[in-house]
Amino acid sequence: MFKVDTTLSRSNVPRTIRFTEEIYNTLMEISSYENVSFNQLVLQCCRYAINDYSIKEKLDK
């Protein structure tokens, strides 16, 4: 289950990313509800996706 982690505060690589309006609005609602920054939430979502990526083990080799 996805749980918001507030410890990802040392992000320092700036990138531009585009979201659909629906995804952006949902992420903004969640970040507001969880009282975390939008950036922290996006980082956590990415970490969750990477950890659950089915061929991650093959990429690590």
Image (spheres, grey):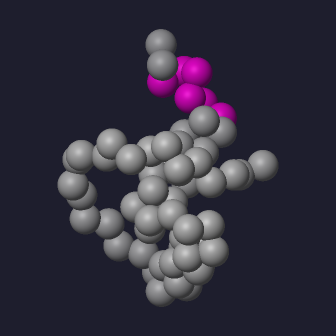
Q: Main secondary structure of the magenta part?
A: helix
The quadrant in which residue 27 appears is bottom right
Q: Which residue is drawn at 51% across and 63% down?
A: 36
Name above or below for residue 13 compared with residue 35: above
Q: Residue at x 44, y 65 (%)?
A: 37
Instruction: Point out residue 56 in the picture as x, y percentages from the top left corner.
Output: 56, 29
Q: Nearer the viewer, residue 6 or 50?
A: 6
The quadrant in which residue 45 appears is bottom right
Q: Which residue is drawn at 62% across and 67% down?
A: 34
Name above or below for residue 42 compared with residue 50: below
Q: Residue furthest top?
A: 61
Instruction: Point out residue 32 in the picture as x, y percentages from the top left corner.
Output: 55, 76
Q: Residue at x 71, y 52 (%)?
A: 2
Q: Is residue 34 visible?
A: yes
Name above or below for residue 22 compared with residue 33: below
Q: Per the image, is 27 magenta? A: no
Q: Nearer the viewer, residue 24 or 59?
A: 24
Q: Which of 36 and 17 is in front in this view?
A: 36
Instruction: Point out residue 59 in the picture as x, y percentages from the top left corner.
Output: 48, 24
Instruction: Point out residue 25 in the picture as x, y percentages from the top left corner.
Output: 53, 84
For the image shown, how many numbered marks are present on the structure? 0
Q: Is residue 23 visible?
A: no
Q: Give the range drawn in magenta.
A: 54-59
Residue 31 located left or right of residue 38: right
Q: Per the image, is 56 magenta? A: yes
Q: Residue furthest front?
A: 35
